[in-house]
Protein backbone atom coordinates (compact mmCIF):
# COMPACT_ATOMS: atom_id res chain seq x y z
CA UNK A 1 0.00 0.00 0.00
CA UNK A 2 1.66 3.21 -1.14
CA UNK A 3 1.47 6.15 1.25
CA UNK A 4 0.31 9.30 -0.46
CA UNK A 5 1.00 12.95 0.26
CA UNK A 6 -1.83 15.39 -0.48
CA UNK A 7 -0.76 19.00 0.12
CA UNK A 8 -3.73 21.23 0.98
CA UNK A 9 -3.65 24.69 -0.57
CA UNK A 10 -5.98 26.24 2.00
CA UNK A 11 -3.17 28.16 3.69
CA UNK A 12 -1.18 28.69 0.50
CA UNK A 13 -0.93 32.07 -1.23
CA UNK A 14 -4.30 31.70 -2.97
CA UNK A 15 -3.61 34.72 -5.17
CA UNK A 16 -0.85 32.63 -6.76
CA UNK A 17 -2.63 29.29 -6.66
CA UNK A 18 -1.21 27.79 -9.85
CA UNK A 19 2.36 28.68 -8.81
CA UNK A 20 1.85 27.31 -5.32
CA UNK A 21 0.57 23.99 -6.64
CA UNK A 22 3.41 23.82 -9.15
CA UNK A 23 5.90 24.40 -6.31
CA UNK A 24 4.92 21.12 -4.60
CA UNK A 25 4.45 19.35 -7.93
CA UNK A 26 7.07 16.64 -7.67
CA UNK A 27 6.23 15.62 -4.14
CA UNK A 28 2.44 15.79 -4.29
CA UNK A 29 0.69 12.54 -5.08
CA UNK A 30 -2.65 14.32 -4.86
CA UNK A 31 -3.53 18.01 -4.64
CA UNK A 32 -6.08 18.52 -1.86
CA UNK A 33 -8.57 21.29 -2.66
CA UNK A 34 -10.75 22.53 0.21
CA UNK A 35 -14.07 23.78 -1.15
CA UNK A 36 -16.11 25.61 1.53
CA UNK A 37 -19.45 27.36 1.19
CA UNK A 38 -19.68 29.56 4.30
CA UNK A 39 -22.69 27.48 5.36
CA UNK A 40 -21.61 23.93 6.13
CA UNK A 41 -18.51 25.53 7.67
CA UNK A 42 -18.03 29.17 8.69
CA UNK A 43 -15.32 29.77 6.09
CA UNK A 44 -15.69 30.42 2.35
CA UNK A 45 -12.91 29.47 -0.06
CA UNK A 46 -13.39 28.65 -3.73
CA UNK A 47 -15.57 26.49 -5.91
CA UNK A 48 -15.70 24.80 -9.31
CA UNK A 49 -14.68 27.85 -11.41
CA UNK A 50 -11.38 28.19 -9.53
CA UNK A 51 -10.82 24.43 -9.64
CA UNK A 52 -11.42 24.51 -13.41
CA UNK A 53 -9.01 27.43 -13.78
CA UNK A 54 -6.35 25.56 -11.80
CA UNK A 55 -6.87 22.51 -13.98
CA UNK A 56 -5.75 24.52 -16.99
CA UNK A 57 -2.36 24.88 -15.28
CA UNK A 58 -1.97 21.46 -13.75
CA UNK A 59 -2.66 17.83 -14.60
CA UNK A 60 -2.29 16.48 -11.06
CA UNK A 61 -4.76 14.24 -9.27
CA UNK A 62 -7.29 16.64 -7.74
CA UNK A 63 -8.71 15.48 -4.40
CA UNK A 64 -11.62 17.82 -3.65
CA UNK A 65 -12.76 18.03 -0.05
CA UNK A 66 -16.28 19.42 -0.20
CA UNK A 67 -17.19 21.22 3.02
CA UNK A 68 -20.51 22.39 1.60
CA UNK A 69 -24.17 21.77 2.39
CA UNK A 70 -25.04 20.45 -1.05
CA UNK A 71 -22.00 18.62 -2.45
CA UNK A 72 -24.04 16.74 -5.07
CA UNK A 73 -24.91 20.05 -6.76
CA UNK A 74 -21.21 20.67 -7.45
CA UNK A 75 -20.48 17.30 -9.06
CA UNK A 76 -21.22 18.18 -12.71
CA UNK A 77 -18.91 21.21 -12.70
CA UNK A 78 -16.16 19.39 -10.79
CA UNK A 79 -16.35 16.46 -13.19
CA UNK A 80 -16.08 18.95 -16.04
CA UNK A 81 -12.86 20.23 -14.37
CA UNK A 82 -11.60 16.62 -14.40
CA UNK A 83 -11.50 16.29 -10.64
CA UNK A 84 -10.58 12.67 -9.94
CA UNK A 85 -11.99 12.32 -6.42
CA UNK A 86 -14.47 14.17 -4.22
CA UNK A 87 -14.97 13.73 -0.48
CA UNK A 88 -18.45 14.64 0.66
CA UNK A 89 -19.28 15.14 4.34
CA UNK A 90 -21.67 12.47 5.53
CA UNK A 91 -23.29 15.07 7.83
CA UNK A 92 -24.36 17.04 4.74
CA UNK A 93 -26.04 14.11 3.00
CA UNK A 94 -29.66 13.04 3.53
CA UNK A 95 -29.05 10.09 1.25
CA UNK A 96 -25.38 9.05 0.94
CA UNK A 97 -26.34 6.27 -1.48
CA UNK A 98 -27.79 8.79 -3.91
CA UNK A 99 -24.71 11.00 -3.59
CA UNK A 100 -22.37 8.09 -4.29
CA UNK A 101 -24.47 7.12 -7.31
CA UNK A 102 -24.27 10.71 -8.59
CA UNK A 103 -20.47 10.69 -8.27
CA UNK A 104 -20.32 7.38 -10.15
CA UNK A 105 -22.58 8.81 -12.87
CA UNK A 106 -20.05 11.59 -13.33
CA UNK A 107 -17.13 9.18 -13.29
CA UNK A 108 -15.65 10.78 -10.18
CA UNK A 109 -14.28 8.64 -7.35
CA UNK A 110 -16.03 9.24 -4.06
CA UNK A 111 -15.13 9.47 -0.43
CA UNK A 112 -17.09 10.23 2.70
CA UNK A 113 -15.66 12.63 5.28
CA UNK A 114 -16.60 12.80 8.94
CA UNK A 115 -16.39 15.65 11.44
CA UNK A 116 -14.54 14.71 14.62
CA UNK A 117 -17.80 14.23 16.54
CA UNK A 118 -19.43 12.03 13.90
CA UNK A 119 -19.12 8.33 14.72
CA UNK A 120 -17.46 6.03 12.21
CA UNK A 121 -20.73 4.05 12.10
CA UNK A 122 -22.14 6.79 9.85
CA UNK A 123 -19.99 5.65 6.93
CA UNK A 124 -19.70 1.90 7.55
CA UNK A 125 -22.86 0.98 5.59
CA UNK A 126 -21.29 2.57 2.49
CA UNK A 127 -17.79 1.09 2.71
CA UNK A 128 -18.39 -1.35 -0.12
CA UNK A 129 -19.12 1.58 -2.45
CA UNK A 130 -16.45 4.03 -1.31
CA UNK A 131 -13.03 4.88 -2.70
CA UNK A 132 -11.97 6.80 0.41
CA UNK A 133 -12.84 7.49 4.03
CA UNK A 134 -11.77 10.77 5.64
CA UNK A 135 -12.05 11.06 9.43
CA UNK A 136 -11.17 14.69 10.16
CA UNK A 137 -8.60 15.40 12.88
CA UNK A 138 -9.71 19.03 13.31
CA UNK A 139 -13.10 20.69 13.15
CA UNK A 140 -13.38 21.43 9.40
CA UNK A 141 -13.19 25.04 8.25
CA UNK A 142 -9.71 26.37 8.83
CA UNK A 143 -6.09 25.37 8.34
CA UNK A 144 -3.46 25.62 11.03
CA UNK A 145 -5.48 24.07 13.86
CA UNK A 146 -4.08 21.64 16.42
CA UNK A 147 -4.27 17.92 15.65
CA UNK A 148 -6.91 16.08 17.67
CA UNK A 149 -5.07 13.01 18.92
CA UNK A 150 -8.31 11.69 20.38
CA UNK A 151 -9.34 10.86 16.79
CA UNK A 152 -6.58 8.25 16.38
CA UNK A 153 -8.73 5.36 17.65
CA UNK A 154 -11.34 6.25 15.01
CA UNK A 155 -8.68 6.10 12.31
CA UNK A 156 -7.55 2.72 13.60
CA UNK A 157 -11.15 1.48 13.63
CA UNK A 158 -11.60 2.71 10.06
CA UNK A 159 -8.46 0.81 9.05
CA UNK A 160 -9.84 -2.40 10.56
CA UNK A 161 -13.22 -1.92 8.87
CA UNK A 162 -11.57 -1.24 5.49
CA UNK A 163 -9.29 -4.26 5.77
CA UNK A 164 -12.29 -6.42 6.59
CA UNK A 165 -13.88 -5.49 3.26
CA UNK A 166 -10.83 -6.58 1.28
CA UNK A 167 -11.41 -3.54 -0.93
CA UNK A 168 -8.84 -0.86 -1.76
CA UNK A 169 -10.48 2.00 0.12
CA UNK A 170 -8.07 4.85 0.86
CA UNK A 171 -7.95 6.17 4.43
CA UNK A 172 -7.17 9.87 4.43
CA UNK A 173 -6.28 12.00 7.42
CA UNK A 174 -6.75 15.78 7.35
CA UNK A 175 -6.18 18.47 9.95
CA UNK A 176 -3.09 19.30 11.97
CA UNK A 177 -0.95 16.74 10.16
CA UNK A 178 2.67 17.85 10.48
CA UNK A 179 6.13 16.48 11.28
CA UNK A 180 5.07 15.79 14.88
CA UNK A 181 1.75 14.05 14.14
CA UNK A 182 2.15 12.27 10.80
CA UNK A 183 3.75 9.12 12.22
CA UNK A 184 0.89 8.55 14.66
CA UNK A 185 -1.54 8.83 11.75
CA UNK A 186 0.43 6.30 9.74
CA UNK A 187 0.63 3.90 12.66
CA UNK A 188 -3.13 4.15 13.09
CA UNK A 189 -3.50 3.05 9.48
CA UNK A 190 -3.94 6.19 7.37
CA UNK A 191 -2.50 6.01 3.88
CA UNK A 192 -3.28 9.47 2.45
CA UNK A 193 -1.89 12.43 4.40
CA UNK A 194 -3.26 15.92 3.87
CA UNK A 195 -0.70 18.49 4.94
CA UNK A 196 -1.63 22.16 4.73
CA UNK A 197 0.12 24.77 6.84
CA UNK A 198 3.13 22.54 7.58
CA UNK A 199 3.92 22.77 3.86
CA UNK A 200 2.58 26.12 2.71
CA UNK A 201 3.63 28.14 5.72
CA UNK A 202 7.16 26.74 5.53
CA UNK A 203 9.95 28.94 4.20
CA UNK A 204 10.18 26.76 1.08
CA UNK A 205 6.93 24.83 0.42
CA UNK A 206 8.52 22.71 -2.31
CA UNK A 207 11.31 21.55 0.01
CA UNK A 208 8.86 20.94 2.86
CA UNK A 209 6.65 18.81 0.61
CA UNK A 210 9.68 16.80 -0.50
CA UNK A 211 10.63 16.14 3.14
CA UNK A 212 7.14 14.79 3.89
CA UNK A 213 7.17 12.69 0.73
CA UNK A 214 10.58 11.18 1.57
CA UNK A 215 9.41 10.44 5.08
CA UNK A 216 6.40 8.54 3.72
CA UNK A 217 8.52 6.74 1.15
CA UNK A 218 10.85 5.39 3.86
CA UNK A 219 8.20 4.74 6.47
CA UNK A 220 8.02 1.21 7.87
CA UNK A 221 5.00 -0.84 6.81
C1 LIG B 1 -9.56 22.08 7.16
C2 LIG B 1 -9.17 21.53 5.82
C3 LIG B 1 -7.79 21.02 5.75
C4 LIG B 1 -6.74 22.04 6.08
C5 LIG B 1 -5.54 21.35 6.60
O1 LIG B 1 -10.93 22.19 7.24
O2 LIG B 1 -10.02 20.45 5.43
O3 LIG B 1 -7.52 20.38 4.52
O4 LIG B 1 -6.37 22.81 4.98
O5 LIG B 1 -4.63 22.32 7.00
P1 LIG B 1 -3.60 22.02 8.18
O6 LIG B 1 -2.69 20.94 7.68
O7 LIG B 1 -2.94 23.31 8.39
O8 LIG B 1 -4.41 21.55 9.37
ZN1 LIG C 1 -9.37 19.26 3.69
Image (cartoon, rainbow, N blue to C red):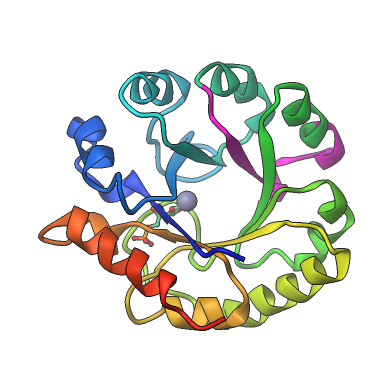
Residue at x 74% of width, y 67% of height:
119
Number of on-image labels:
0
71 to the left or right of 100: left
Residue 70 appears in view: no
Residue 44 appears in view: yes
Magenta stretch contains residue 214: no
100 to the left or right of 118: right
Q: How far from the left and from the top, in percent, is residue 179?
A: 32, 77
Q: How far from the left and from the top, in percent, is residue 107?
A: 70, 26
Q: Identify the image quadrant of residue 1.
A: bottom right
Residue at x 28% of width, y 59% of height:
209
Magenta stretch contains residue 88: yes
120 to the left or right of 135: right
- Displayed-image quarter of ligand 1: bottom left
Question: In the rendered image, which quarter contains the C terminus?
Answer: bottom right
Q: Start and end of the magenta stretch?
A: 82-98
Residue at x 25% of width, y 31% of height:
18
Q: Identify the image quadrant of residue 27.
A: bottom left
141 relative to 38, above or below: below
Q: How far from the left and from the top, in percent, is residue 8?
A: 37, 50
Residue at x 18% of width, y 60% of height:
207
Q: How far from the left and from the top, in percent, is residue 55?
A: 39, 24
Amino acid sequence: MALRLAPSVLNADLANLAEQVAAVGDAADWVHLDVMDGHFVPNLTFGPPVVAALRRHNDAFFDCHLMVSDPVALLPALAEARVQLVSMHVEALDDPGRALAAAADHDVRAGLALRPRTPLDAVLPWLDRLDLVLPMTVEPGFGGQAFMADQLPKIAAARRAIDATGRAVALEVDGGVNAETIDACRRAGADVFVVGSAIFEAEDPGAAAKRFKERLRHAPR
